[in-house]
Amino acid sequence: MRHCCRCFSSRCASTTLPAGQAACCRRPGSRRPALGALGGADGNVVRVGVESVSAAAPRSESAADRRWLADVATSDAALRQVLHGLPGVDEVGVRERVAALATRSIKRDAKMRALDLAIRTVDLTTLEGADTPGKVRSMCAKALRPDPDDPDVPPVAAVCVYPDLVGEARSAVAGSPVAVASVATAFPSGRASLAVKLADVADALAARADEIDMVIDRGAFLAGHYGRVYEEIRAVREACGGAHLKVILETGELATLDNVARASWLAMLAGADFIKTSTGKVAPAATPPVALVMLAAVRDYQLATGRPVGVKVAGGIRTAKDAIRYLVLVNETAGPAWLTPALFRIGASSLLNDLLMQRSKQITGQYAGPDYFTVD
């Protein structure tokens, strides 16, 4: 059976279709595995029950799925069976798909809408040891009014700072739609005890952070200690209460796209509201192939559970052209429902000015000089 050009699986997870028919994860009515029908540790597909799920009408998470999720979390062995039973990622297929989507051209009116959408998805970020309250206040002013001369430019989605500067950011954006995000859990390494990580989260929440960007312990993940990673994410998820949790995978340290897919599923199973590519402190950070795999994972997770999970790409995204390419990936992989700040974010510090320059060019026909806009 041919593998699906959209999911890039080296083997098809659905074996119940007529011979020769490709199982496409984007075709309405395609038969896709429910959560309990993922592959076993031996690489064979475990048929625990398959149902037809339409991309247009994802089903709600059932009681059986909730029981299955509880069973999955009982041990490293159970998590390993699920994560290593996921269809393998065809890296060549992923890169070919990314290259094909990069050739898409966007015309004038659509480009203006794309630029505004990209601005609305930005998490404007400063995560430097030299950060000061004044720098954070300046960044927040930029987040609220990216171009002081053009009130039609929308605000960004959020500002992202260290926990000790959350209070400064909170007061600067008070009464606005701009959220305050804080990194936590021993950012960027993730190497600390759970108690220290939870204290980090508590500090950010006490200062009224709306969103927590946590980092996973990549060493534990790569060593196969999936249960430890799962339990840490679950503990942080519970500590967050009503705050949104973004789980940073640090994909530059995961070595393979298969590991990116596994880490994505592990974070979602543990309760992540968003999965995020990187801290921005490790190269490579966000890349289109990694983003495509993560977008496919959130799409498949929603089809399986009914729960949408967002994706945040961060690190190395500096130009409007880059940002628009990611929007195309989102639209063509997860689907247009993800084209909203509620389900897609771009973490960046220097990107916003290029988006503003390109937007000005669309309106005036001329590029503004690099010094026209304030420093992010």
Image (tube, rainbow, N blue to C red):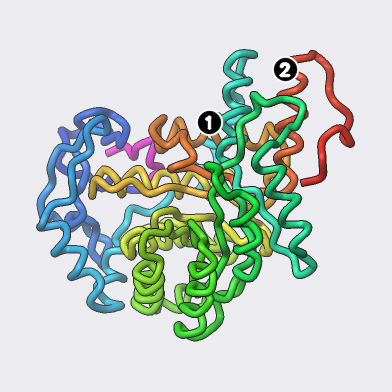
Q: Is residue 96 left or right of residue 349?
A: left
Q: State the image coordinates of residue 133 (x, y, percent, origin top left).
A: 74, 62
Depth check: 94 or 161 in front?
161
Mark number, residue 139: none
Residue 252 drawn at (x, y percent): 60, 61
How far is disc 1 from disc 2 in space, using C-alphas?
Answer: 19 Å
**Residue at image location 74% in from the left, 65% down from the top:** 128
Can you say whether 347 is above or below 153 in the image? below
Query: Which amino acid type corresponds to the residue marked 1 in the rendered image?
Result: Val
Q: Residues within 10 Å of mark 1 (few under 14, many from 20)?
A: some
From the top left corner, tell me how far across and down residue 5 is, in percent: 39, 35
Whether residue 20 is visible, yes or no, is no
| Image: magenta residue range | 1-9
In this picture, is 190 found above or below 260? below
Q: Nearer the viewer, residue 160 or 138?
A: 138
Q: Which mark is residue 362?
A: 2
Label 2 amino acid?
Gln
Whether residue 345 sits left or right of residue 354 in the image: it is: left
The disc at residue 328 is: 1
- Report the side of 223 relative to 42 (left or right): right
**Residue at screen point 34% across, 37% down:** 4
Secondary structure of the residue carrying tag 2 is: helix
